[in-house]
């Protein structure tokens, strides 16, 4: 029995077509090997939300009976390969469809492979990936995360390269020959074939040992039973003026403690409290209410609530007061205002370091013409 | 919230203490009786949209308001869907509400009806039972009200105008009990009840006030001073627990109903047994079962057959939800065969029987003594069911009791021209 399943973890809207292409590619390739295959998205996900973590799956089996184990399910219990279409997902994901922060390797079989699109080194990624009780492999397809829009697709061959790399790390699921055969049907495409073959040749795997990696305990909560749940579908409002320990004045808005949203973020705002004029615009324009009001009237972006949309950076009238920075630069959610209040010089140094040399990251459509500029840069 | 079940009363419902009463007697229809109950319950918000035969209720209610006898927000909606949406929301903010409809009007409100039960809102509605169009028909069939039978609605059928008034008061008390918080629909057969007048005892306001407490939504009320959201979007990991809560509320309704009938009997000196009415069942060898006004010709026929020495009785099902499984098992424990007369249909169902017949078969399946069950479809579209019809049916039931016919479990259409 050579049943195999592949999970594609991607970011809503930006990578939905990418995830679909990968899963369809796997199924069509499986058919070339005389196998059966299915592809499906995790039904309760809501991938029509910018950046929200979501999943698609492709399952390959020798015959229909073996496939039945994977039917009428939302997700397989274990996957041979977890494809991570954006490396910031290595910090874990909280989607619309489930509760708590799920480690990226949660559904990976012991000995399976986490296949990540990234410009980073394996060690840098292992820093973010939660520890697992069993060893697994980490393979990197070199490159930036490929982000598209709802109606447009950036055909940069990320899908082809992932399919090629998949054949290398999990040949029992799908072979390179069948991937190439599927790519060239119905129309021969030498460029795509070359991309798949190149990734097959270049991809390298590192073994990650049991209990190696991020030792953070992902936030979880107990699902209440029907006797504990409030009756009549009532959900209590949350106090918008809860007192903040150590803060005199200011307040933190009431927020949903079971759906924090931060794993939607690929960039975070870094704030300059020295130039901030307390004009309130970031606070008012933030679509997620993620700014806390500090006792001195500054606005502090709360990293458990921020989705990283970048609107605060756009609307801030002060040059370089708010700067969006690639999420890979951070390993915690600590309050920037608290850091600044404690030691202003140290904060200034931290701020310059974070904003200086990070790889450019955006949702791809920050301004008109950006896509053309990026394509031009990639070809340079 | 308490999940304690209320024990069934130890005393039978005959032994009662009669309270002093101050009632007037009025010659009114079943619809007007419902309107009086609505007035006496001091309902806050009423919505209306005309459809026969329910619309007689809105006529009587608006006349009471015009005469200065009743004060409420009376809103004529632009459709049944809006009609039931409005009272649904009014109930969520803590208003006692009333609405009603008939036939396909009731079904046009179906989205609101499903959500009302799902949200545990104690709406009380009157269904003037009517055939489902097309073809256009306004005679009685029970399929309209039965459409919501699986959703958490409490459902009852009444047979007299007096019972309509009394049951409406009981309905408010049970629906608005925080242990229940489920909507309740009172079914009144079109024409025979909605459009026919009889002498009805209309209780005083003081009597009703002593029986029916105010609606208190408690900390579930939707109000700026009580910041809550209701009915969030959920996924598969939450919904089943919510459904289980509704299931438990429907289970608790049984005990609350028994309690309400006991108190109603004590305060008003009438009301009878909750769930079912037993007629000449003590030594019955076969029984007939039905709902609503067809009890009238059935009782006539039972008396005639009793005069001929035939041991037949009748059980009228008053409450269809919660379904009186225990009472029916017990009432039918001694009979050899049961004839169920359905004023409804369930095409393609088991044995092609009516809804009540199939529900009863299910209720009696685990019983120690399982009588044969014969299903009759009768009186559709408001066609009269005569005592002679009932006697013919009973003949078939006696046949089944003696094991006659290979098709004894089958369903018979009564009065349909061949």
Image: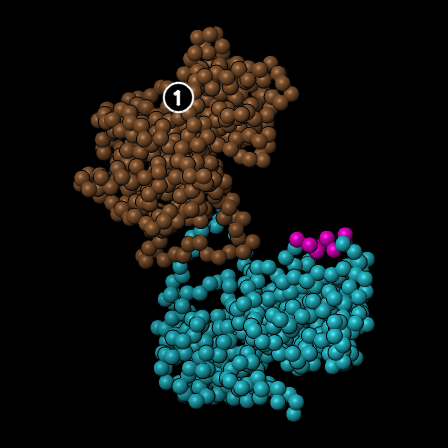
Chain colours: A cyan, B brown
Q: Report the span colored magenta.
A: A65-72
Circle 1 sits in a helix, a strand or a loop, which is it? helix
Q: Residue at the location (76% across, 76% down)?
A: A188
Callout 1: chain? B
Q: Where is residue B198? Give x, y as percent.
A: 28, 25
Residue B32: say if magenta. Answer: no
Q: Residue at the location (29% across, 27% down)?
A: B197
Q: Residue at the location (37% across, 43% down)?
A: B123
Q: Who is closer to the viewer here, B386 or A98?
A: B386
Q: Where is residue A209? Give x, y as percent.
A: 73, 70
| Residue under label 1 | B296
Residue A68: say if magenta. Answer: yes
Number of numbered discs overlaid on the protein picture: 1
Q: Few, some or many C-alpha atoms within 10 Å of disc 1 (few <14, some 14-19, many ≥20)? A: some
**B116 on left or right of B373:** left
From what the image shows, is residue B44 above or below residue B31? Answer: below
Q: Who is closer to the viewer here, A275 or B26?
A: B26
Give the quarter of the image for residue B381.
top left
Residue B175 visible in the shown view: no
Q: Who is closer to the viewer here, A213 or B253?
A: B253
**A194 on left or right of A101:** right
The N terminus of chain A lies in quadrant: bottom right
Q: Where is residue B97? Give x, y as percent.
A: 32, 44
From what the image shows, is residue A233 above or below residue B17? Answer: below
Residue A25 visible in the shown view: yes
Q: Residue at the location (70% across, 60% down)?
A: A38
The C terminus of chain A lies in quadrant: bottom right
């Amino acid at each position: 029995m050579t049943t195999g399943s592949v999970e594609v973890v991607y970011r809503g809207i930006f990578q939905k077509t990418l995830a679909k292409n990968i899963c369809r590619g796997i199924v069509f390739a499986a058919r070339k090997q005389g196998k059966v295959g299915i592809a499906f998205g995790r039904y309760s996900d809501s991938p029509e939300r910018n950046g929200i973590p979501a999943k698609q799956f492709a399952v390959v089996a020798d015959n229909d009976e073996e496939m039945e184990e994977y039917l009428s399910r939302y997700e397989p219990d274990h996957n041979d390969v977890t494809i991570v279409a954006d490396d910031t997902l290595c910090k874990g994901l909280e989607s619309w469809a489930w509760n708590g922060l799920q480690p990226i390797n949660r559904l990976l079989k012991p000995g399976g492979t986490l296949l990540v699109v990234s410009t980073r080194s394996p060690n840098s990624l292992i820093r973010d990936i939660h520890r697992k009780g069993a060893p697994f492999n980490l393979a990197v397809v070199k490159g930036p995360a490929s982000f598209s829009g709802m109606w447009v697709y950036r055909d940069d061959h990320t899908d082809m390269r992932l399919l090629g790399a998949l054949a290398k790390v999990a040949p029992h699921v799908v072979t390179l020959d069948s991937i190439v055969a599927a790519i060239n049907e119905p129309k021969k495409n030498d460029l795509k074939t070359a991309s798949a073959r190149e990734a097959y040749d270049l991809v390298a795997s590192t073994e990650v040992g049991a209990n190696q990696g991020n030792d953070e305990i992902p936030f979880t909560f107990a699902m209440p039973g029907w006797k504990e749940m409030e009756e009549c579908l009532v959900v209590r409002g949350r106090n918008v003026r809860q007192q903040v320990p150590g803060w005199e004045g200011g307040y933190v808005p009431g927020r949903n403690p079971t759906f924090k949203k931060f794993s939607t973020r690929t960039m975070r705002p870094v704030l300059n409290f020295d130039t901030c004029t307390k004009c309130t615009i970031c606070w008012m324009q933030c679509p997620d209410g993620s700014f806390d009001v500090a006792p001195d009237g500054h606005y502090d972006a709360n990293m458990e609530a921020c989705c990283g949309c970048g609107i605060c950076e756009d609307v801030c009238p002060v040059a370089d007061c708010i700067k969006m920075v690639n999420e890979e630069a951070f390993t915690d959610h600590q309050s920037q205002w608290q850091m600044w209040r404690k030691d202003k010089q140290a904060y200034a140094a931290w701020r310059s370091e974070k904003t200086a040399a990070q790889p450019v990251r955006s949702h791809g459509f920050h301004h008109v013409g950006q896509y053309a500029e990026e394509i031009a840069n990639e070809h340079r | 919230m308490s999940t304690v079940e209320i024990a069934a009363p130890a005393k039978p419902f005959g032994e009662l203490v009669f309270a002093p009463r101050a009632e007037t007697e009025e010659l009114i229809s079943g619809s007007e009786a419902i309107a009086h109950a609505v007035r006496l319950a001091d309902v806050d918000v009423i919505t209306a949209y005309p459809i026969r035969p329910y619309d007689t209720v809105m006529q009587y209610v608006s006349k009471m308001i015009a005469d200065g006898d009743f004060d409420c927000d009376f809103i004529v909606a632009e459709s049944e869907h809006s009609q039931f949406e409005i009272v649904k929301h009014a109930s969520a903010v803590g208003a006692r509400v009333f609405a009603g409809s008939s036939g396909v009007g009731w079904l046009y409100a179906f989205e609101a009806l499903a959500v009302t039960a799902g949200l545990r809102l104690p709406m009380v509605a009157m269904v003037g039972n009517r055939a489902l169009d097309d073809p256009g028909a306004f005679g009685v069939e029970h399929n309209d009200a039965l459409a919501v039978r699986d959703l958490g609605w409490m459902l009852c059928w009444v047979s007299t105008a007096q019972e309509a008034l009394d049951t409406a008061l009981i309905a408010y008390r049970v629906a608005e009990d925080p242990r229940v918080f489920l909507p309740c629909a009172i079914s009144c057969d079109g024409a025979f009840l909605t459009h026919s007048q009889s002498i009805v005892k209309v209780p005083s306001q003081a009597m009703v006030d002593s029986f029916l407490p105010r609606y208190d939504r408690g900390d579930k009320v939707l109000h700026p001073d009580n910041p809550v959201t209701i009915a969030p979007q959920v996924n598969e990991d939450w919904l089943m627990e919510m459904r289980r809560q509704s299931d438990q509320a429907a289970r608790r309704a049984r005990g609350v109903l028994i309690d309400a009938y006991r108190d109603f009997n004590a305060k008003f000196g009438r009301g009878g047994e909750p769930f079912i009415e037993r007629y000449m069942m003590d030594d019955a060898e076969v029984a007939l079962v039905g709902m609503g006004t067809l009890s009238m010709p059935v009782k006539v026929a039972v008396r005639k057959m009793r005069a001929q020495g035939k041991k037949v009785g009748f059980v009228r099902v008053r409450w269809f939800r919660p379904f009186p499984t225990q009472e029916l098992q017990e009432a039918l424990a001694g009979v050899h065969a049961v004839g169920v007369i359905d004023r409804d249909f369930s095409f393609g169902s088991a044995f092609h029987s009516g809804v009540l017949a199939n529900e009863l078969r299910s209720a009696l399946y685990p019983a120690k003594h399982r009588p044969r069950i014969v299903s009759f479809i009768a009186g559709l579209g408001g066609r009269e069911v005569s005592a002679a019809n009932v006697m013919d049916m009973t003949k078939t039931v006696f046949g089944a009791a003696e094991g006659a016919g290979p098709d004894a479990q089958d369903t018979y259409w009564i009065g349909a021209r061949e």
